[in-house]
Amino acid sequence: MKNRQLSIAMVVTLLLAGCGGAKSDAGDNKPSAGSKGTVKLAINPWVGYEANADVLAYLLEHQLGYTVEKKNLKEEISWQGFETGEVDAIVENWGHDDLKKTYIEEKKVAVEAGPTGNTGVIGWYVPQWLADEHPDITDWNNLNKYADLFKTSESGGKGQLLDGDPSYVTNDEALVGNLKLNYKVVYSGSEAALIKAAQQATAQKKPLLFYFYEPQWLFAKEKYARVKLPAYSAGCDADPKKVACDYPDYKLDKIVSKKFADTGGAAYGLIKNFTWTNDDQNLVSDYLTNQGMSADQAAEKWVKEHESTWKPWIPAGS
Amino acid sequence: MTAVLTRPTSDVAEPESPRRRATGRTVSGILIVATVVAYLVFHTTAAADAPDAAAFRFLGDVRDWVDANRDTHPVFLYGVNYLRLGVRLLVDVVRAALAGLGLAGLVAIAGAIAFVLGGWRTALLAVAGLLGFGLLGLWPESVDTLALTLTAVLLSVLIGVPLGILAARVRWVGAALRPLLDVMQILPTFAYLAPMTLLFLIGSPAAVVATLIYAVPVTIRITELGIAGVAPSAVEAATALGSTRRQLLTKVRLPMARPTLVLAVNQTIMMALSMVVVTALIDAPGLGVNILRALERVNVGAAFDAGLAIVIMAIVLDRVTTAAARRRRRDWRIAVPVLAAAAVIAVLPIPDGLPRISFAKPVNDLTSWVELHWYDSTEGLKNTISTVLLNPLENLLVTTPWWLFTLAVLGFGLLVAGWRAALIAGAAAAGLSALGLYQHSMQTLATVLVATALTMLLGIAAGVLSARHDRLAAITRPVLDAAQTMPSFVYLLPAVALFGASRFTAIVAAVIYAVPPVVRLVERGIRDVPATVVEAALSAGSTPRQLLWKVQLPMARGGLLLAANQGIVMVLAMVVVGGLVGAGALGYDVVAGFSQREDFGRGLAAGLAIVLLGVLLDRLTQGFHRAKGPS
C-alpha cells in the first residue's frame, strides 16, 4: 500500500513538475526521515566504514525507531547520491576537498556533520619481518634498491606497489612517478584482496609493498612497518599530478545531504553527535571480519557493551 | 545467451582456385616480413599514455557542462530528466506489484502462468525456482532484479518489436539499422555505464536504460528475422482475399511469426538479466549488489548463493517463455480455475517465512582448502602463462608504433576480410591512439588475444569430444546452458580466489565465460559435416585421427571461424570487467572513471576505446569468416 501511495505521489509530482521542467532531484519527494522515516546510509567498500555505519544503523533502528536503507556505493558515487536524493549520509569521509568544494560550496546539496573521532592514516607498508631483515627498506630513498624483491607477474619488470580499490583516495601513481621510483602501481580491486595479499606476505614470507590505512583491524593481529615518504606539509598535495610527499593525517568526518540536515530530526542529530575512537572501530571491524558476525550482531554486541559511549549521541528529547 | 542466433552472418562461400590461394600466401608472407622489418626499425620504448590527453580533457569538460546544466538546460529539464522520472516510476510500479504479492502470492501466480503456458512440468519448475529464492534468503534481492529485468524487457519489446517490423518491411530502415545494431551488440556491458550515469545519474533509471540498450538489438534482430521469414505464399493468399495492409500485419504476419517473436522476448530476457546484474556498479538494487559485495570481500560462498539465484531466475524465465512459443495452449476450462486459485492465494496473507539454506559455508571451506593446497600450482600456472605468453605479446604490442599497428591491421584486414572491413578496422585502430589510450588498448588487446587462444584451444577440444560422443554431449548440454545464463561477472570470483588480482585472473574468467558458446559452435560445425563425406573417408581407410584432422575439422572451418568471432567478442567483454580485479588497462580506466571524479574523462575515453577494439576484432574475424567461408 505504501508503495502504491508512493507511485501516486510520484505521478502527481510528475504532473506538477510538468510546468517548469524536471530537476534532477524531482520525483524524490519522500520526506527525508522527517518523522521516523527512512535513513539512506551510503556504505563505502571498506570494513572500518561498515563498522561506523552498522553501529549507527543499529541505533537508528533500535533506539530511535527509524528504518535504515544501506546502499553499497563507492566514495565519489555516494557524493553524487546527495544530488539525486539516493543518499542521506556518508559516515566516514576521507578528506575529498575537491568533492566538498563541488557538492557543499557550489551545488549546496551537502553539509558537513562533524568528525567521527577517528584519525585516518594512509601510507605504504611492508611486512614487519621484511623491515627486520632490511631495516633501511622503510625509507623511500632506498626503495629502488629493493625493487627486485617486489617484482611480480603484473609489474612488468619493476617492483610492485599493491593498491586497493580504484575508488580509494590515493596519490600513488603520481608519487611513484614524481619520486622516480622503479615501481608500478597494481590495483588489487578491494580491501579484502589487499588484506589477503598482506596476510600471505606475512605467513609465507613473500615480500610485499602495499598501500594501506588505519584504522584497520589487521594491525591488531599482525605487524606491518610503514615506509617513510617525504614529509607532508600543508598544500604539498594541492596538485594531484605533482604530489611528491606523504599523505596527511585525515580527520575523518561525516557528510550529510542538505535536505537530511534540514529535515532529518533525531536521525540527523544522532549522526552529527556520533564520535568514537579507532579502537572502537577496530573492535567492530574485527567482529565483522574475523568473528563471522553479521552487521546487526556486531553492532548489537558493541552497543550492549559500550552504553556509556553511545548514550551521549542520542539527541535530547528523543 | 545464444548469441549465435542473434548475429546472422551471410555466408558467401566462394570456392577458391588453387592459384588464388597461392598468391594469397605470397602476399601474406610479404606482409608479415614487411611488418616484422618495420617493427624492428621503428619499435618504440612504449612511453606510457599521457595522463591528460586532449580526449580526456574534452570528455571531462563535457561532464562538467552536463553537471552544471543538469537543472537548467531544456534538454535535461524537458527531456532526459523526464525520461529518468518515467523509467523510475515504471520500475517502482513493477516492483510494487511484485513485492506486493508477497512470496506465496508470487509463487502461486508464477506457477499458474507457467502451468497455463507450458504444463505441469514448467509450473513445477517455476514454483521450485521461486521458492528457491526464499530458501536462499535472497527474496527481496531477487524481486528487485526481477523488477528491473521485466521493466527493461517491457521497454525493449515496446521499442524493439515495432522497429523490427519496420526493419523487415522497409528496406532502408533495415539497412540503416544493421551497422548500428552490429556495433551495439559488440559493446561490452562495461563500456556504457559511465555515459548512463552522466545522463541519468545513479540508480534504477540509469540501470534500466543501460539494460535496454544492451538488450534491444536482440529484440529488433529476431523480430526482423521472424517477420521477414513469413512465407510469401501466405501473404499472397491473404492479399488475394483482399486483406488491407493492417490486416496483413495483424492477421497474417504477426501470428505467423509468433514463435519467432516469443523467441525474441526470450532472448531479450536473457540479455537483460545478465546486464541488470552488472548495473549494480551504478547503484541498481538486486542480486548484483550481493555479487559486487562478495567480490569486494573475496567471499566466494556469498557470490555462489547469489549466482545460483540468478541461474534459477534465468532458467525459469527461459523455460516459461520457450513453453509459450510452443503454442500448446491450455484449455480455458482448466486455465481459468488455476489462475483464479492463484489469485486467491495471492490475496491471502501468507507469511514469507521459509527455512534458510545457504551454500556459502561449504563453498568457502572448499575455496580456502584449494587456496591453501593449490597455492603453488595456481601461482606457478599464473606466472608461467604471464611470462611465456602474456608479457612477450604485450611487450610486442605496446612497443609497436601506433601507425604501424594501424597499417598492419589495414593490410591483414585487406587480405582476410575485404576492403570494407579492413577500412573500418583500420579506422578503429587509429582511433585508439587518437583517444590517447594506445598503450592501455594494446595491453588489453594482449590479454584478449591470449585469453582467446586458450578459449579456442579448450573450446575446440571439448567441442570435438562432444561431437564424437553423444553421451558426453548429453551430459554437457545442461552445464553449457547454465554457464551461458550466468552474468559475466560471477566468473570473476572463483578466478580471483584462485589467482589473486592479476591479468591472468581476467584471462581465466574470460575463458570460463567464452568457452561454452565456442564448444557449441564447434560441436555443431563438426556434426554438420555430411554423413556421406564421413562414410566415404572411413571406407577409404581413414583412421579416426585422419578423419578428424583431414576431413571433419577442415570441413567445419566455417563453424570454427564463427566460434572464433563469437569467442573473441565475449572474451573482450570479460577482460575489461577484469579491471575490477587488477587486470588493469582499459578495464581499470573505466572502473576508475566512475569511481574517481578527476578520472571521468579518461574513463569515458576508455569506454570508447573498448568499443573501437571490439569493432576492430569483430570486423577482422567476422570478415575472415565471411570472405573465406566454409569451403
Image (spheres, rainbow, N blue to C red):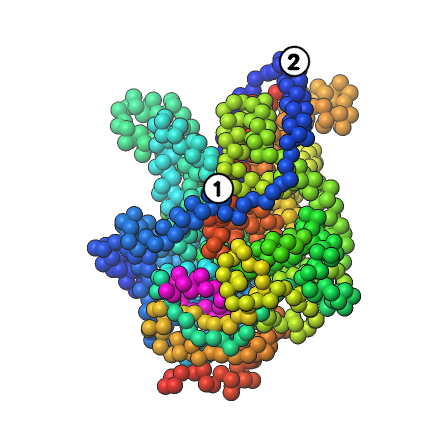
Expressed as whole percent of the image width and height from the top left, the position of residue B252 reads: 34, 30
- Identify the residue under disc 1: B608
Question: Residue A130: within the magenta?
Answer: no
Q: Position of residue B349 (x, y in %)?
A: 40, 68
* View extreme (bottom): residue: A308
**Residue B301 location in percent, x, y?**
62, 60
Furthest-left residue in this view: A19
Residue displayed at 59% across by 37% down:
B568
> SS at mark 2?
helix
Question: Do we see residue B577 in this rendering?
Answer: no
User: At label 2, which amino acid type do we have?
Assistant: Pro
Residue topped by disc 2: B18
Say if A204 sits above or below B196 in the image.
Answer: below
Q: Is residue B63 above or below residue A143?
A: above
Q: Where is residue B510 shown, x and y percent of the image?
A: 61, 45
Q: Is residue B584 visible?
A: yes
Report in which chain the residue with disc 1 lies.
B
Question: With respect to residue B555, does B567 lie above or below?
Answer: below
Q: Secondary structure at mark 1?
A: helix
Residue in front for this viewpoint, B384 or B150: B384
Estimate the spatial distance between the alpha carbons at disc 1 and disc 2, rounded to whole Å. 42 Å
Q: Is residue B59 left or right of residue A48?
A: left
Query: Which of these two is toward me, B203 or B466?
Result: B203
| Along the viewing direction, whichever of B333 and B439 lies nearer the viewer | B439
The reply to whether the magenta stretch includes residue A90 is yes
Q: Residue at x 39, y 75 (%)?
A: A268
Quarter the C terminus of chain B occupies: top right
Q: Pointers 1 and 2 in contact (CB under 8 A)?
A: no
Q: Which residues lie in the magenta part?
A: A86-105
